[in-house]
Amino acid sequence: MIQTIEAVIDTNGKVILQSDFKPERKYRALVTILEEEPKEEISETALLSEKSLAESWNTTEEDEAWQHLKELPSF
């Protein structure tokens, strides 16, 4: 299985995978160091739209509309 997974290496050399990868066994890996900085975790668009979305979503009507999802069993 050859697979590419994005990761960040911190200043202590710790490799932090950016996706949920839970291998069933040990694998060898090659690490390629890229010159660019890691992507920001939160996009600028998300930050800029947060206030207007909150005004639309944080209402009694929205809470009532999605109430049925709170009653679903958790897995």
Image (cartoon, helix red, strand yellow):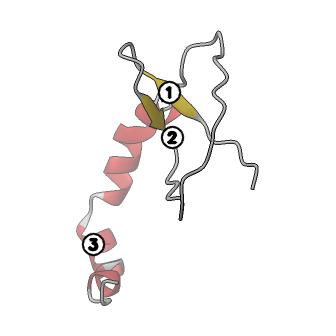
As measured in the structure, the alpha-carbon distance from the residue carrying label 3 to the one carrying label 2 is 32 Å
Sequence-first tag of 3 and 1: 1
Position of the N terminus by quadrant: bottom right
Position of the C terminus by quadrant: bottom left
Tag 3, which secondary structure?
Answer: helix
Mark 1, residues whose alpha carbon is within 10 Å: few (<14), some, or many (≥20)? some
Relative to 72, say whether 52 is above or below.
Answer: above
- Residue at (54% x, 53% y) in the render: 26
Mark 2, residues whose alpha carbon is within 10 Å: few (<14), some, or many (≥20)? few
Tag 2, which secondary structure?
Answer: loop
CB under 8 Å between discs 1 and 2: yes
Q: Residue tagged by mark 3?
A: 63
Amino acid tagged 3 = Asp
State left or right for residue 24 relative to residue 54. right
Q: Residue tagged by mark 2?
A: 18
Amino acid tagged 1 = Val
- Residue at (35% x, 58% y) in the render: 57
Q: For this rendering, which residue is in front, 27 or 74?
A: 27
Mark 3, residues whose alpha carbon is within 10 Å: few (<14), some, or many (≥20)? few
Sequence-first tag of 1 and 2: 1
Residue 13 visible in the snapshot: yes
Relative to 39, say whether 21 is above or below.
Answer: below
**Foreground disc of the pair 3, 2:** 2
As measured in the structure, the alpha-carbon distance from the residue carrying label 3 to the one carrying label 1 is 37 Å
Q: Residue tagged by mark 1?
A: 8
